[in-house]
Amino acid sequence: MLFATQLTRDGFEPVDRVRVYLDLSGSMEDVLAPLYAALAGCLDLVEPVIYGFSTGIAPLTHANLRSGLRPTTGGTEIDAVSAHLLASPARRALVVTDGWVGRIPADHLQRMRKRRVRLAAAISAGGDGTFAKDAGYPVFTLPALA
């Protein structure tokens, strides 16, 4: 207010990149290709490794995404994500899923809150974001992708 000048900035640079957990279960098969393409378009905003999940966690590099690699056990359990997140120093995460993942275990949720982990869920069209809503995390519904 006291000094008049024009600030210039060439682009947006996030403080830190977000950790992404991508549901690779069979129920996500029809939307994985467009999700991979969307993630490939914003790689500068996400951690260098994206974590695919089903009943376990599979690290995916950006090159893996571009090639379409889809390691999965077929099922889906959110506790694999919460345990993995808690075992890491990450404090921001996005879970991309159809939401049919069960509930975040109470002890995981308590520890996530204590660490002030910020989590958000991006739910595919027709999915269920209850697992995140019930835990107090924001839920965003994606448009139909398939």
Image: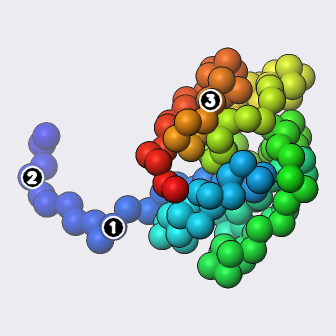
Marks 2 and 1 sit apart, C-alpha to C-alpha, by 22 Å
Checking the image for residue 129, the label placed there is 3
Q: Which residue is mark 1?
A: 11
Residue 49: percent from left, percent from top: 72, 67
Q: Residue at horizontal 71%, vertical 62%?
A: 50
Q: Answer left or right for 104 relative to 131.
A: right
Type of residue at label 2?
Ala
Viewer can see residue 111: no
Which comes before the other along the chain, label 2 or label 1? 2
Q: Answer left or right for 80 relative to 12.
A: right
Q: Residue at horizontal 53%, vertical 69%?
A: 37
Q: Residues within 10 Å of mark 2 (few under 14, many from 20)?
A: few
Q: Residue at horizontal 86%, vertical 20%?
A: 106
Viewer can see residue 141: yes
Residue 40: percent from left, percent from top: 54, 71
Q: Answer left or right for 37 relative to 112.
A: left
Q: Which residue is mark 2?
A: 4
Which secondary structure lies at badge 2?
loop
Q: Residues within 10 Å of mark 3 (few under 14, many from 20)?
A: many
Marks 3 and 1 sit apart, C-alpha to C-alpha, by 32 Å
